[in-house]
Amino acid sequence: MDRIRLVGGHELNGEIPISGAKNAALPLMIASLLTQEPLVLVNVPRLADVKQLERILENHGVDIAVHGRRRGDADMGGQRITFTASDIVDTTAPYELVSTMRASFWVIGPLLAREGTARVSLPGGCAIGTRPVDFYLEGLRALGAEIDIDEGYVVARAPGGRLKGATVTFPKVSVGATHVVMMAATLAQGTTIIENAAREPEVGNLAECLVAMGAKISGIGTDRLVIEGVETLGGAIHEVLPDRIETGTYAFAAAMTGGDVLLRGARPELLQAALDVLARTGVEVRTETDGVRIVRNGSGIDPVDIETEPFPGFPTDLQAQFMALMARSTGVSSIRETIFENRFMHVAELARFGARISVDGQTARVTGVPELKGAQVMATDLRASVSLVIAGLAARGETVVNRIYHLDRGFERLEDKLSRCGAQIERIAG
Ligand code: EPZ
């Protein structure tokens, strides 16, 4: 299994290009199931999760054509990929494919809306919490679907072959359930209202793509989406948003090592809460025409308390990385996780660098230390893994991060991007 070896203590200086967002690309790719016509996505990141979803879509009959340059070229630009679902050849999403990536469960929305039937494996357990699918099923039932659970599969049928518009009120904000009910409602008969919809930018990015495909959606960007169903959707060309979690991760990394880094292509409004918190730590955060600049020259890192929240609050997907930063602060900070019940798996690994963190329920208390020391570490999920990389960048001596397949799921060319800014970091194969 590949590992990452890095030697910490080097400032980051230069530019880091921000890739297309994984969590925007995945639902956009799934939306291609809604139409016979080609959906062209621009700025798709080169990631293991994108590859895996391509396999899942191909199983349903989607033809996939990748244009432009592939990984390994000097060009850091994203991929342009055409997805054409002329015929849906299979409405089953099998366990072997769905169990490796939770987002693949989302195919249930388009399959049910277009074909009137879907059989999708329940996603497996997950390192960050139980992550049930009750909101999805209740939402689809509200649209008239009949749903059974059979041998680990969700079997859904739309009586008469078509879903019917309805009001769906989510008890808690859910990004995935909003994606699924919104996609399903585009082809339903009548109007659907989604109350307490997720406002995450990736939901807006999907909604805009659906509109380009001919869907009628209003309230985009708010917590109340109104979707008037249409008979069919057509093709479109749509751009994937820049990745706000990648942006925040590198912003925290630069804050931690010190230096001056331009995050090229980043859009600050997609992560304003996190950038505001970063500015409160004493780091300079500057919006420029072509991105966001992060500067720290020798000053200490002030402690700041945070709580994760749905958008526009501080994102749970940056909580682990912020904890790494706070491990080097000049005081005590508290970090409360409110989205997932088990998202502190990185605490024990950060402790291996000498971080002082105690956990009480959903709150971690971090006492900053003047120096972290390199260590052998291993992580359990994508964002936790990258928190260990940024801790290692600021630690004295050598760090080896094991199980980096997690990183490859969500960070494009991580070693490349960091080493171009002066980090001493390499991948060790085997
Ligand atoms: C999306 O997951 C993201 N994944 C996650 O990023 C992100 O952490 C999360 O949203 C929150 O922002 C993708 O976009 C692919 P939710 P999702 O449904 O949609 C509970 C990463 O690292 N819930 O918004 O699965 C759930 O348990 C990943 O890129 C129910 O109770 O998250 C959680 O507590 C990790 N019942 C809360 O809602 C349901 O039916 C929010 O989860 C659905 C969700």
Image: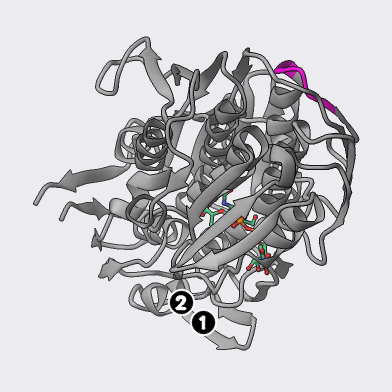
Any magenta on residue 28? Answer: no
For ligand 1, the image quadrant comes to bottom right
In this view, the residue in front, 175 or 335, is 175
Can residue 20 be seen at all in this image of the molecule?
yes
Count of residue discs: 2
Residue 130: percent from the left, percent from the top? 54, 74
Q: What residue is rendered at 44% in x and 66% in y?
A: 124
> In the drawing, does residue 125 fall left or right of residue 289?
left
Q: Are marks 2 and 1 in contact (CB under 8 Å)?
A: yes
Q: Nearer the viewer, residue 101 or 75?
A: 101
Residue at x-position 44% and y-position 34%: 13
Name which residue lies at 73% across and 41% down. 160
Sooner in the amino-acid sequence: mark 2 or mark 1: 2
Q: Nearer the viewer, mark 2 or mark 1?
A: 2
* Magenta-colored span: 212-216
* Image quarter of residue 397: bottom left
Residue topped by disc 1: 357
Residue identified by numbered label 2:
347
Camera-side residue of 412 and 234: 234
